[in-house]
Amino acid sequence: MCGKKMTVTHNTTLAAVFLMTKMLLIPDYQVYISTNSAAQSIEVFKKLEDIALQRIPSFASANDLFAGEVVKSANSETGFIHNPAGHTMKLYNNSGLTTLSTNLNAIRGKRGSVLYDECAWQTEEQMAATEHFADLDSSFALSTSKIKYIRPKTMPLQLLYASSAGDVEYPYYSKYVMFSKKMLMGDPNYFVCDLNAHAIKNYSSVNGVLIESHLTDESIKKAMEDDPDSAERELFNRFRKGGGENAVVSMESLIRNSDLRLPLLCNDTGKKKFILCYDPARNFDGSVLSVWQLIEDKSIGYYLQLENVISMVDPGTSKKTPLPMPAQLDIIKDTMIAYNGARAAEWENIELYIDAGAGGGGISAVADQLMADWTDRHGNKHRGVIDPDHKQYETARKTYVDAMPIVHLINPKGFKALMYSDLEKVVKLNLMKFTEYDGKDHITVELPNGEFQEAKLSQEEQMALAQINLLKNEMSYMCRYESAGGGISYDLVRDKRNTMHDDRSYTAAMAAYALTTKRRKDLLTKPKEKKSVPVFNFRAPNIKK
């Protein structure tokens, strides 16, 4: 691999081994790792560290050659320094590696080569702040004495982009296209390597001898079935084209409001507040329940944090149709109990929003069944719940007087446009927070003291994070259409309407509507702060008559 500017799609491990080799062979080779988050940069650093310290069992022939060249100190026995401000290591030949934070103002002005890992979603501003690291001529040397010999040229600084495919609107795509053209034209400063799933599965080798790949036909097929859009990008490096200019929510907004954190599968304190949004279906559509934590901030007021998304799919069906409604009702009840929390009054911590469209059965199959008191699987009795305002329950409210008024039935015909309009606004205002997930069985989370730690994920946590990714993906394909008469409608982008559902994004729109309602009530009911007005004391004038 050669050239000053290179793109590799999309093997990060290959990039780690490549950098280790260059740092060993080339003195004074400084490399910086740039990603979408500090935690992601540190994960790349730890991948290199694990290879060097022989912690990866699948790398059976790895040796300690690189680890022996790392400079040790009294504070670090291995030489791999885990500083919250930036993980770093240095070799005896003065080569080194440093992770970068996402604070652009704090990282400007450095000089060295840059590895952009999973950079398909980096913005123009992010890349511009770090690409200038490689502007310096590494062979430049200044001396006051006469040069008595010719100095050998040093390795030029390089920019290495390693990522799966992203969106055509982001700069990584334009670089991928431009670098490919430059390489094909014979420019030695550019190199592009496109490694898709078939290349890795069929042509993985050691010293020219084919080896068994870690990818299988079954795993590729399953990925395509579970999330075709993601599999196209992650496995086959096919760039996507989202909603474009008409998109309700841009990928940039979603990325800006996503962070690495564990999903919350229950109300762990019994004091947190949650909004549950349910879009029911039985036959032709998806049935989804999303769970949002309602958080009040002193500066910005209420905002939502997505904690879980439950897709009620019957795994026994070939076309992944929804579960029978009684089974869906059981899941809703279990979720209500989990997120209301232990040692909390009945339903004091949750509100339930249900789509009341005629086709989904939200009223007859769900809301009607929740009005009466019921007993859970552990024998505990719970009060029923009811919509306090819906006209269909005008007489039922007199019968089920003990039912808690926490249900909100939403008519999609009258509210869909309003809900998606609210969704567009609250995401732009950074009032909806999401998780970031790369499909692994662990994530790197930031601790309160600023350090980072690897957290193993349970099966339930992996499922929640994967479903949140699907919700974000659906949101990015929702578009705003304006008719000739001035009417506004919302739907999936045209080329996705036959291959993708919008149920997850619809629950996000319901949540945005709920948040907007909460913020409006909070604004109207909160007492206005009395602002002190400066009073100037003047002595009464003496007026002569």
Image (cartoon, rainbow, N blue to C red):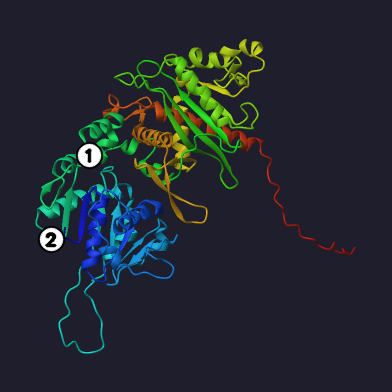
Q: Position of residue 36 (x, y in %)?
A: 36, 51
- Give residue 412's position: percent from left, percent from top: 45, 21
The numbered dot on residue 215 is 1
Q: Of the residues shown, which amino acid type is indicated by label 1?
A: Leu
Q: Which of 481 and 495 lies nearest the eye of the viewer? A: 495
Q: Quarter of the image containing the C terminus? A: bottom right
- The quadrant in which residue 85 appears is bottom left
49 sits to left or right of 18:
right
**Label 2 CA crowd tier, 10 Å (few <14, some 14–19, many 20+):** few
Q: Work out whether 85 lies above or below 399.
A: below
Crowding at dot 1, Cα within 10 Å, few <14 / some 14-19 / many 20+, comes out as few
**Relative to residue 544, is residue 247 drawn left or right?**
left
Viewed as shown, does residue 533 lie left or right of 2? Answer: right
Spatial CA distance of label 2 from label 1 is 32 Å
Residue 82 pos. (x, y %): 42, 61
Type of the residue with mark 2:
Pro
Q: In what quadrant of the picture does the N terminus appear? A: bottom left
Q: Is residue 175 above or below residue 149?
A: above
Which residue is at a point 40% across and 70% down the rendered structure image? 73
Q: Secondary structure at mark 2?
A: loop
Q: Quadrant of residue 323?
A: top left
Q: Which is more foreground, mark 2 or mark 1?
A: 1
* Residue labelled with disc 2: 188
Using the image, determine if residue 268 lies above or below residue 118. Answer: above
